[in-house]
Image (cartoon, rainbow, N blue to C red):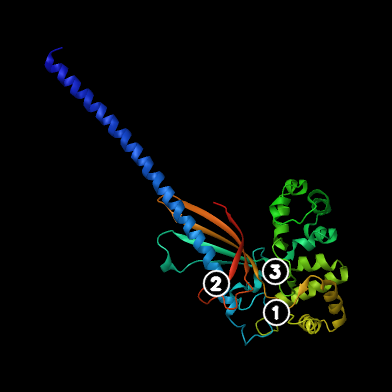
Amino acid sequence: MTSRGSVLAIALWVIAALAAAAVAVSSYLSTETRLARYVLARAQARAWAKAGILLAMQRLAHDALQPEDASQPELTYDWLGDDWAVPPDDARQTDPSRWRVEMIPTPGAVSGTNRVVITVKDEERLLPLSKALLDAEILTSLLEDPEAAQALIEYQGNIKNAKVVVLEELWALPPFQARPELKAMFEEHVSPYAEGPVNINTLSPEAWKAIAQDSAANALIDALTQARDGAGAAASPCHATSKTTAAQELADCARLGDVMPVSQLLNSLDAVVGFDVQSSTFSIIAEGVAGLSKTDVRYSIKAIVQRNASSVNPMTVGGVPFRVMAWRELR
């Protein structure tokens, strides 16, 4: 090979090496760019989720200051001014998410596919877990599973011998492992975060029947439920506004004509239900979504918040409307 040919071969080899290096560097930079975009999108989704928790807390604090609708004084909600949390009539008793509300910022507040979806659940519309775990009949009625009910009673009384503070610690029990659907059934009616009475107007029929534990009372509950769900716009809503008038109001609503059975039902619920109860404990799940070119990056945060009773006016500067009882980043 001549010197000229050697130089040409070396030049071609160098060019090939440089081309291979360029491809490798390009691939590396492309991977790094995609990774950087994902990390940035994930951080953005997390920021959206955190902002969503704060937005929901602000909304709840604002509602607490709004007076109830003067045109409908007979409507008693769990917290004052919660008109946005009242479910549609057709979903009031059929949709498991009937007490959940999705709030999405206005279109002007988001760009592209970036968004946050906030779900707020009033924990005090549910039976307190501490009370439910003391009664096997209530648990059996709610879960329709005597084995699961007995496992819950034994877990709190014998195995743990202490108060259950989160539902997740119950899911390892054999009945819940064997029947995962029991989890959703239990979460729909029971809350570990609320301790006070449940508003009579927001107690689900299933919870009513679990507490009453009487066939005659169950028939009465069905009549009241049908009257409440079937009330038209011109009809009087089936709500009880005070303990002294509850029996008459509910009897009139269901057109029962006899107050005595309703009074007996209310007496059986007396230890659990309340009237004109203002809720203070809420669970909030905020899911932040940041859009990439081919997929979305999601980040969820769940917070349990409780109204701060010491804050007279939570909307004033420096006021603290809520305290965070639990914070979990679900990612």
Name the residue tied to disc 3. Answer: 125
Report the mark closest to the observer, 1 or 2. 2
Where on the picture, by quarter, is residue 66?
bottom right
* In the displayed structure image, the side of residue 51 where residue 178 appears, left or right: right
Query: With respect to residue 98, does 245 lie above or below?
Result: below
Report the mark closest to the observer, 3 or 2. 2
Name the residue tied to disc 1. Answer: 231
Q: Secondary structure at mark 3?
A: helix
Instruction: Report x, y in % for residue 293.
Output: 40, 51
Quarter holding the N terminus is: top left
- First in sequence: mark 3 or mark 1? 3
Instruction: Report x, y in % for residue 68.
Output: 62, 82
Callout 2: few (<14), some (14-19), or many (20+) C-alpha neighbours within 10 Å? few
Where on the picture, by quarter, is residue 34?
top left
- First in sequence: mark 3 or mark 2? 2
**Front residue of this view, candidates 291 and 164:** 164
Q: Amino acid at mark 1?
A: Ala
Report the mark closest to the observer, 3 or 1. 3
Callout 3: few (<14), some (14-19), or many (20+) C-alpha neighbours within 10 Å? many
Name the residue tied to disc 2. Answer: 59
Q: Cβ–Cβ below 8 Å for labels 1 and 2?
A: no
- First in sequence: mark 1 or mark 2? 2
